[in-house]
Amino acid sequence: MYGITNDDIDNIDNKILKQKLFLSTGLIDIVGSNKKLLECTYSANLNPKKYFAEINNRVNTMFNNAKDKGLKPVFVTLTAPSQYHRKYQDGNLHIDPNETAKALTQVWNKFTNLQVFQKMKKELGHGLVYFRVYEPHKSAVPHLHAMIFIPVNYILAVKKKYKEYFSSSSWGANKNAIDFKYTWYKQGGGAVGYIMKYITKTFKDEDTKAVQHAVYWYIKHKVRRFLSSRTLAPLSLYRKVRYYFKGKYKDDFNVVTQKRDAGVFKKLFDDTQILYIYYNHDSGEIEEKILWAKNTDLLLKARANKELELAQSKNQRDNFKYIKPNENKKALVVKMDGIEKYVFSATKNKFVEIPTVPSRLKNFQLYNYFKKLDSLPLEKLNIQHYLITKNEMIKRGMLNQEIQPLNNTTKTYGF
């Protein structure tokens, strides 16, 4: 069924098992607590419950947003023409299911760019809102289900274009194999329940022993289960900042989207930090909060592994090549907050900390660096270095104070 063999099932199960074992042994620090990497993984294959919950959240948020805008849900089905269903004598398809899915995507994109949608975009002020799901026939050929949200006065015009476009010679689908549904009064659960029925089919039921070949079909042919328009905040942002909003707001995905549109998230230092800019009602000032920062240990290990791979690759290429011992090389440097913080030592084969020289920092770097030093407790503070940094701030006119002598630390700070 779905072109999946017993060997396919065994190979895929073994691959997933190895990935789960690996992720179960690794730990990551999140807001002061250690969690297994597997718990933090959003994968339909490795952590299906977490992935499905996120999709359910996205679907409900998109439905609510569309309802608020007065848009109506329309469900469509698109089947590939006969040439995509042809098979060889051994039963294998002429065209790989992955290629068929790509062809369905291309024709879908062309359809949603027709004049009727361009007119709708001008009228609404935003692009088409939709999500789509790919599902295999038992023959392993994929077909497409999509839920689109359009104004009620556009439904009949879009239906006409849909039937014309996909039954024409340019695509050539069978008229009986394309569907356009926009009434839900007889459907239990309404439009949400209707589309979720198709999404649920793409997940393996781990509570039963029944083998659902369709799930293995997605993995074998690398077909994505669920895709949507860029209506909501991208997952690359939402997953990094959601913890901050989840307890405060019921509809966290919508809140993150609204704040994304308002421009309150700022990415810094090659996307290794995400800042949240907000108004503090207590202080009456605009403040910044770091919501997400790339784990320093992971960053350093990744850089070290990359350096090691490059060194090994170079040794293989230049096995018999003489290299001068004092040959100049560009050092591998790790920056934090825009400041060079660590450098890779080839002799020690590890990263070593670079002392920060305040006079070499740019104004923005110096200001942020001083703020961090100023927030440290005295027992963790190098007083002399703190004074050097503070004096540099005063010299540049960033602090309205007098320069303090470095030998006055005992009198000033009690040390």
Image (spheres, rainbow, N blue to C red):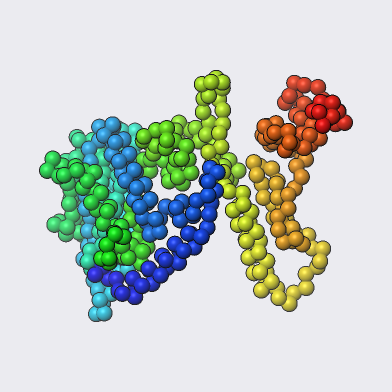
Q: Residue at x 34, y 51 (%)?
A: 52
Q: Residue at x 17, y 52 (%)?
A: 179
Indicate whether 223 appears above or below 257: below
Q: Hey, which quadrant is residue 403 in on the image?
A: top right
Q: Hey, which quadrant is residue 103 in on the image?
A: bottom left
Q: Hey, which quadrant is residue 143 in on the image?
A: bottom left
Q: Nearer the viewer, residue 286 or 252?
A: 252
Q: Is residue 354 left or right of residue 58?
A: right
Q: Position of residue 384 (x, y in %)?
A: 81, 35
Q: Residue at x 65, y 59 (%)?
A: 304
Q: Nearer the viewer, residue 217 or 181?
A: 217
Q: Nearer the viewer, residue 87 or 166?
A: 87
Q: Nearer the viewer, residue 198 or 270?
A: 198
Q: Is residue 94 visible?
A: no
Indicate whether 110 appears above or below 127: below
Q: Residue at x 73, y 24 (%)?
A: 399
Quarter of the image for the N terminus: give it: bottom left
Q: Is residue 301 left or right of residue 110?
A: right
